[in-house]
């Protein structure tokens, strides 16, 4: 709040709001040169003390109350020292009256300064609150008003301009309390960010070199990272973390990437699996290498557990491809499938979380040159509560069919860790976060509709006030739905497609290749009739099944709305908080 005093009288309201207190010397002057030649020693000492007392007085108020108080205390000390020299025997000295007049003048001036110091102290208290980003309370504002009123009531005429300044300042502080708090909060934040960036620039010099070199190796997937490189990066992360926690978290994720990468360089796949399980806090369920050009890994899954199938090409050239899908001979509605990319082409990662005990198979086609290559794999289990944030923060999920009520309920009641998030009041399930450095999320609503929302607008914990504005709307079931009724509906529509498909083809060609107008019109009429007949048949044969499914889906939707708005469930992992932490590392500039 330090501005040239002349701004108080020439730059209008905005300048007044931020101006400093008036300088005493700039309003007519209070300092008097005492020049008394010769005289008694005590009188001369008194004169010298008073002269120094005037010089010690603060030049202005409202800048630094502590410093102003120290200066005023020094002036008071000098006044007391000089006054002690003016004893009864010095009254006969020819210079006594002149020096004593300076004593009176200094005493009166200090009295005025004490009144201004009270104003400054009260203003300083308000400013500290503003710097903390908060508005001053009524008690603080009243303290300032009272101090200014006391100054105005006791001020001598020559202090008129100082009184007017303090009255304006007190009025501005009260009237602009909120804006001043916001302004100070922003200023402090900017200064803090500048300081952090200066320190980060120094701390990140070496770590950025390590990371750049390490990434060049990891992208190729051909050579193991030296253990010393990982140790050195970890050491530098500690320095960065001490400066700015989000930057430390960002680089710590890099360390996890490096350790995941290096684990696969263990000669034995079983050792690599144990390394990964230890690194991420899981338990090895299976490990091995594929044979031929098909992935087929089976394991027995336990309820409320998640299973990570981590794969790495034995020989990686960049042309290999792998597909990974999950199936079960048990209740398919109990499977929740997810995939994890992390931009590592030499790796293949996927997994499931399950809501019941059942057998699970990870299968898919493998593409590679020749016959000797293989995908090394490890199946690692986690209780839902211990699912790794390393995976949860950067994965996509396969959203179940909305018509499969059991699977749809589980998606919201027992979600894949980190996928259930909240907007302002409404819950969503994240189907893809578009990468850690993206600001967008792809989400599903309670009716299964897809939306795009920004990351900074979501949170992991349920808000105090919860409501769902999404209205129920039935959508056709997935073509590969596991729901029995949905299968009947799909079969019904397939039968109609097979019946009318050839007829559409026939009359479509007749219309396209018609040689006369009558042939064209006849073909067009047949196509129109086919459309009407098909629609009637779909309504009569498939409509009842669809209505039954729609009713059940609406009941499921309503029950879920009541549950989520009533209980306000949260995911086992707060991924939005983690995204926010990393975002601070991206945006601190």
Image (cartoon, rainbow, N blue to C red):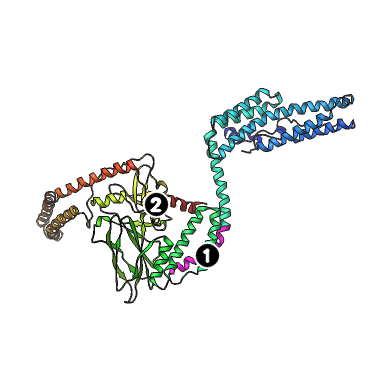
Q: Residue at x 10, y 57 (%)?
A: 519
Q: Is residue 244 above or below residue 128?
A: below
* Circle number at residue 231: 1
Nearest the viewer among 378 and 111 is 378
Give coordinates of residue 218: x percent, y percent: 45, 67
At label 2, counting other C-alpha atoms closer than 10 Å, the crowd grade (few under 14, some 14-19, many 20 or more) is many
- Judged from the image, the secondary structure of the residue bearing numbered disc 2 is loop
Q: Main secondary structure of the magenta part?
A: helix
- Residue 585 in the magenta stretch? The answer is no
Mark 1 / mark 2, whichever is N-terminal: 1
User: Residue 396, can we see it?
Assistant: yes
Q: Is residue 412 above or below residue 265?
A: above
* Circle number at residue 478: none
Give coordinates of residue 561: x percent, y percent: 29, 43
Magenta span covers which residues? 202-220
Q: Residue at x 70, y 23 (%)?
A: 157
Give coordinates of residue 528: x percent, y percent: 13, 52
Contact check, label 1 and label 2, Cβ < 8 Å: no
Spatial separation of the CA atoms under disc 1 and disc 2: 28 Å
Nearest the viewer among 182 and 263 is 263
Outermost residue on the top side: it is 153
Give coordinates of residue 219: x percent, y percent: 44, 67
At label 1, counting other C-alpha atoms closer than 10 Å, the crowd grade (few under 14, some 14-19, many 20 or more) is few
- Judged from the image, the secondary structure of the residue bearing numbered disc 1 is helix
Q: Residue at x 71, y 33 (%)?
A: 26
User: Residue 402, can we see it?
Assistant: no
Asked which quadrant contains residue 112, the reply is: top right
Q: Is residue 416 above or below residue 92?
A: below
> Which residue position is annotated with label 2?
573
Quadrant where the N terminus is found in the figure: top right
Residue 145 in the figure: left or right of residue 510: right
């Amino acid at each position: 709040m330090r501005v040239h005093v002349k701004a108080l009288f020439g730059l209008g309201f905005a300048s007044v709001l931020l101006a400093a207190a008036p300088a005493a010397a700039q309003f007519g002057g209070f300092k008097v040169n005492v020049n008394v030649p010769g005289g008694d020693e005590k009188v001369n000492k008194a004169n010298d003390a008073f002269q120094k007392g005037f010089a010690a007085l603060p030049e202005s108020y409202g800048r630094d109350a502590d410093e102003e108080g120290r200066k005023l205390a020094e002036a008071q000390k000098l006044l007391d020292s000089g006054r002690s020299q003016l004893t009864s025997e010095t009254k006969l000295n020819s210079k006594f009256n002149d020096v004593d007049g300076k004593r009176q003048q200094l005493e009166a001036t200090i009295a005025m300064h004490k009144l201004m110091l009270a104003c400054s102290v009260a203003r300083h208290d308000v400013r500290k609150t503003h710097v903390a980003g908060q508005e001053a309370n009524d008690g603080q504002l009243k303290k300032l008003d009272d101090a200014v009123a006391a100054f105005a009531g006791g001020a001598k005429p020559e202090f008129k301009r100082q009184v007017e300044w303090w009255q304006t300042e007190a009025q501005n502080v009260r009237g602009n309390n909120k804006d001043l708090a916001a302004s100070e909060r922003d200023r402090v934040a900017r200064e803090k960010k500048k300081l952090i960036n200066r320190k980060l620039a120094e701390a990140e010099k070496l770590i950025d070199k390590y990371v750049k070199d390490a990434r060049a190796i990891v992208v190729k997937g051909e050579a193991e990272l030296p253990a010393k490189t990982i140790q050195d990066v970890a050491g530098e992360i500690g320095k960065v973390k001490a400066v700015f926690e989000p930057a430390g978290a960002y680089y710590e994720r890099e360390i996890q990437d490096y350790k995941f990468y290096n684990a696969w360089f263990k000669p034995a796949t079983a050792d690599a699996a144990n390394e990964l399980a230890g690194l991420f806090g899981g338990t090895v369920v299976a490990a091995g290498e594929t044979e031929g050009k098909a992935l087929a890994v089976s394991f027995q899954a336990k309820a409320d557990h998640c299973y990570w199938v981590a794969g790495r090409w034995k020989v990686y050239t960049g042309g290999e491809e792998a597909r990974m899908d999950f199936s079960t001979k048990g209740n398919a509605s109990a499977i929740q499938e997810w995939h994890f990319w992390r931009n590592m082409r030499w790796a293949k990662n996927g997994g499931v979380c399950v809501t019941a005990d059942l057998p699970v198979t990870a299968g898919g086609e493998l593409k590679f040159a020749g016959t000797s290559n293989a995908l090394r794999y490890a199946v690692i289990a986690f209780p839902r509560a211990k699912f790794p944030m390393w995976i949860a923060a950067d994965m996509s999920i396969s959203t179940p069919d909305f018509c499969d009520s059991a699977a749809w309920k589980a998606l919201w009641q027992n979600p894949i860790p980190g996928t259930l998030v909240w907007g302002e009041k409404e819950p969503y399930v994240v189907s893809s976060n578009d990468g850690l450095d993206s600001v967008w999320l792809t989400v599903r609503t309670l009716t299964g509709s897809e939306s795009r929302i920004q990351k900074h607008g979501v949170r992991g914990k349920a808000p105090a006030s919860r409501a769902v504005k999404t209205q129920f709307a039935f959508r056709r079931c997935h073509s590969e739905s596991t729901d029995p009724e949905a299968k009947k509906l799909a079969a019904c529509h397939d039968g109609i497609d097979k019946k009318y498909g050839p007829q559409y083809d026939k009359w479509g060609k007749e219309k396209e290749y018609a040689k006369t107008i009558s042939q064209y019109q006849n073909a067009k009429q047949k196509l129109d009739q086919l459309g009407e007949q098909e629609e009637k048949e779909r309504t009569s044969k498939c409509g009842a099944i669809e209505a039954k499914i729609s009713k059940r889906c609406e009941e499921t939707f309503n029950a879920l709305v009541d549950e989520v708005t009533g209980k306000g469930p949260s995911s086992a992992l707060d991924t939005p908080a983690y995204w926010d932490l990393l975002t601070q590392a991206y945006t601190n500039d």
